Amino acid sequence: GAGVSQSPSNKVTEKGKDVELRCDPISGHTALYWYRQSLGQGLEFLIYFQGNSAPDKSGLPSDRFSAERTGGSVSTLTIQRTQQEDSAVYLCASSLATASSYNEQFFGPGTRLTVL
Amino acid sequence: GQQVMQIPQYQHVQEGEDFTTYCNSSTTLSNIQWYKQRPGGHPVFLIQLVKSGEVKKQKRLTFQFGEAKKNSSLHITATQTTDVGTYFCAATPNTGNQFYFGTGTSLTVIP
């Protein structure tokens, strides 16, 4: 079956523009995570969706960042008025259940965002 | 907030030598996962540890979860060039549902 897919794979934008990043999780996975990874760094948690529950937005770095998950499946991460420090690889992951039970996160290939 | 420290940040070993990376949390964990990320790739799940003092093995890899469930380690015996990559731990605290990733240990194996 298909894994987690993300689009676009690369995005180059100008400072101040808005961008939308898309994530298609594995079918049937109720949990979806967004992370940000800067060059040579670890994964920074951004937001977490679980089923129909309110998302955990505690990792979003500013109000320029927002995310939606429509119909419990596809998710879109939106960054408004992009800044150069937003440049990073944005990774999406999905899993069968919550982090408190046995499950693994399946990562997508990521979207490399470059803000000029 | 939750902090997950991972050491060392970098490790260079000669092929055939052993390698260990350590993950430490400031709070008690519900469980811990380990991931491997090859250069240019995305993280791939290796294992999850849940029980206090748990030890799991996968061929040359040995994973341990501390008795207090605050630390974990990954040990690779007789490294090979295919082991090259960055190893991350991902911890879930007793409260909350999100994962906190460690800073990762980048392993270089010199043939």
Image (cartoon, grey):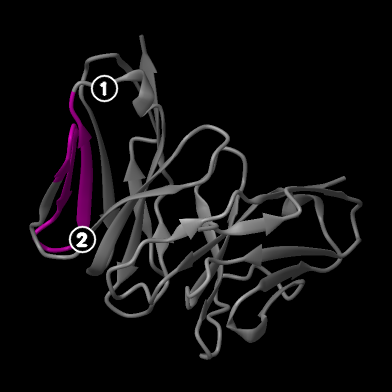
The chain containing the residue under callout 2 comes to: B
Vertical position of residue B90 compared to residue B92: above or below: above
Magenta residues, dominant SS class: strand
Image coords of residue A74 (percent x, y):
65, 73
- Does B21 sit left or right of A45 as displayed? left
The residue singled out by tag 2 in the image is B70
Quadrant of res A103: bottom left
- Residue B93 - label: none
Q: Secondary structure at mark 2?
A: loop
Q: CA distance from mark 1 to mark 2?
A: 26 Å
Q: Which residues are magenta?
A: B57-77
The chain containing the residue under callout 1 comes to: B
Vertical position of residue A111 compared to residue B50: above or below: above
The residue singled out by tag 1 in the image is B79
Q: Earlier in the sequence, mark 1 or mark 2?
A: 2
Label 2 neighbour load within 10 Å: few <14, some 14-19, many 20+: many
Image coords of residue B89 (percent x, y):
34, 51
